[in-house]
Image (tube, rainbow, N blue to C red):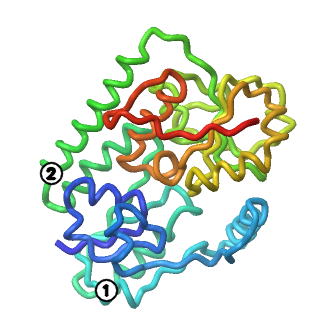
Amino acid sequence: MRIASLVPSSTELLFALGLGDEVVAVTHECDYPAGAAELPHLSETVIPPGLSPSGIDAEVKRLVGRGEPLYRLKADVLEEVRPDLIVAQDVCAVCAVSYEDVVSIAARLPGNPAVLRQDPTTLAEVMDNAGEVAEAAGRPELGRALRASMEARLAAVERAVGGRECPSVLALEWLDPPFTGGHWIPEMIRLAGGRDPVASPGEKSRETTWAELAGLDPDVAVVMPCGYDSAKAAEQARRYGREIEKTGARRVVAVDAAASFSRPGPRLIDGVELLAGILHGYESADGTLAHEFVAS
């Protein structure tokens, strides 16, 4: 089967399922695993490079407000790769090509490829996606195996942190303006042995203000700007250090959001393990605690 992925998390899921050899094209943001980045790109962003976080937020709001797409789908490339299956998403307009655009273009392609929509908002739904993709690819056993592995790792974390005090965790998915963690993030915090004082599982990430967050006094503020790696997250944490300090956070930690938090794929389990390490010293399967501390 020839599979085109229009979502970075779905690309990661396809490779984790063992279907990497069947992936024929991906988005311009698909950078994991390494081999994915070498495949033909099906999309490009319309957001100008070099904008500040506030500039990115303003441009996104401007385009969304006008009903304009944030990404362009390269229909010519999609036609060239001749997919049998296209994996798309509709959960976040900022994350990938519009699902409606994909369906419209797919209907005009030779062979009438199937389009599978992925819209997870919780960890359970992320694991459901593994089964759905594997089923659509004709390999349901791969989905069952991956889900079992993910569930076993989560169970190991829950056993390790069970019965311990639950520190409060403020997840910051953007800093200018501030957005608190949404969708699966509060659930990840709970599984890692913490509690989210401002959000509930499945809710969208919420735009707020630093004034509203002042005096919240979380035990830990985890800086996870959507799509940023840990180095860029640390840079943002330092830049907005005064604002974060006003929240009363006792510790501030910058993490690789792109790898373990913002993409709803298998590496969210890495994120739960990482959070458990930050909160309780939990050691993941490879024996490392890959997080970075940033002075508030």
Q: Amino acid at mark 1?
A: Leu
Identify the residue under disc 2. 140
The residue sitting at 24% across, 48% down in the picture is 131
- The residue at 32%/42% (across/down) is 127
* Picture quarter with the N terminus: bottom left
Task: Give the Cα separation between the discs numbered 2 and 1.
Answer: 26 Å
> Looking at the image, which residue is at 66% across and 42% down?
172
What percent of the width, then of the height, locates residue 196?
A: 61, 27
Quadrant the C terminus occupies: top right
Task: Decide if residue 21 is on the left or right side of residue 219.
Answer: left
Looking at the image, residue 90 lies above or below residue 159: below
Q: Is residue 67 left or right of residue 82?
A: right
N-terminal label among 2 and 1: 1
The circle on residue 5 is none
Eye-nearest disc, 2 or 1: 2
Kind of element beneath mark 1: loop
Is 136 on the left-hand or right-hand side of 59? left
- Which structural element holds mark 2? helix
- Residue 109 sits in which quadrant? bottom left
Q: Which mark is residue 109?
A: 1
Q: Quadrant location of residue 93?
A: bottom right
x and y percentages locating residue 116 in the rendered image: 32, 63
Please, what is the three-letter code of the amino acid marked with disc 2? Pro
Q: Position of residue 294 (x, y in %)?
A: 68, 39
